[in-house]
Image: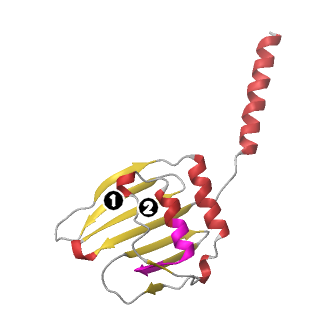
Amino acid sequence: MIIIKTIVVGLISLTLLSCVKQEIRDPFRIIVISSNYSLAYSVETTITDSLAQAQFIGGLVGEKPKVLFKRGLEKSQLDSFYTFLKQESLDTLQRIYDTGVPDGMQFFYEIDYRDKIKKVQLGNIWIPQLLRLTQIVNTILPDSLKYNLAVAKYSNAP
């Protein structure tokens, strides 16, 4: 009887400790869209606090989106996104950064966190905050879907 009580008390203690250690985090949603206008398609990656998904979006009439990748995130991957969201000052970002070249690398970002939504478009240019975010996104994608980080100029613009 004492053994059963000890086991029950131990299980209750472990359950309470695990509840106390769990950090409550605000939900987030990050969307990254890479568009290739010359080939009439985009790849859209959506990351939330529970799921990562990439889909192919064809630009031809009648083409339906096709899911290319979908899975949950590991704790370390979630930690990377939360660290980014807490450290980066997204409020200072402009709506559009563009080199004036209509073709080439076109990225669209939508970041929804703590009741704020930030939308930014990059046209053939990287800015530090979104380059860093794209590097984090690349860590969860299979090699075939990783975004090419070498296709644009680099800018120190905030």
Could you say which is closer to the camera, residue 23 or residue 9? 23
Gap in angstroms between the C-alphas marked 1 and 2: 9 Å
Q: Which mark is residue 46?
A: 2
Residue 55, horizontal then vertical, whole percent: 33, 59
Location of residue 63 (image quadrant): bottom left
User: Does the magenta portion include 156?
Assistant: no
Q: Are marks 1 and 2 in contact (CB under 8 Å)?
A: yes
Seen in the picture, residue 64 relative to 129 is either above or below; the reply is: above
Residue 156, horizontal then vertical, whole percent: 57, 82
Would you name the residue on which mark 1 appears?
55
The magenta segment is 120-133
Seen in the picture, residue 31 relative to 142 is either above or below; the reply is: below
Residue type beneath disc 1: Gln
What is the crowding at mark 2: few (fewer than 14 residues within 10 Å), some, or many (at least 20)? many
The first of marks 1 and 2 along the sequence is 2
Location of residue 88 (image quadrant): bottom right
Residue type beneath disc 2: Thr
Could you say which is closer to the camera, residue 40 or residue 100? 100
**Who's the residue at 76% across and 37% down the image?**
17
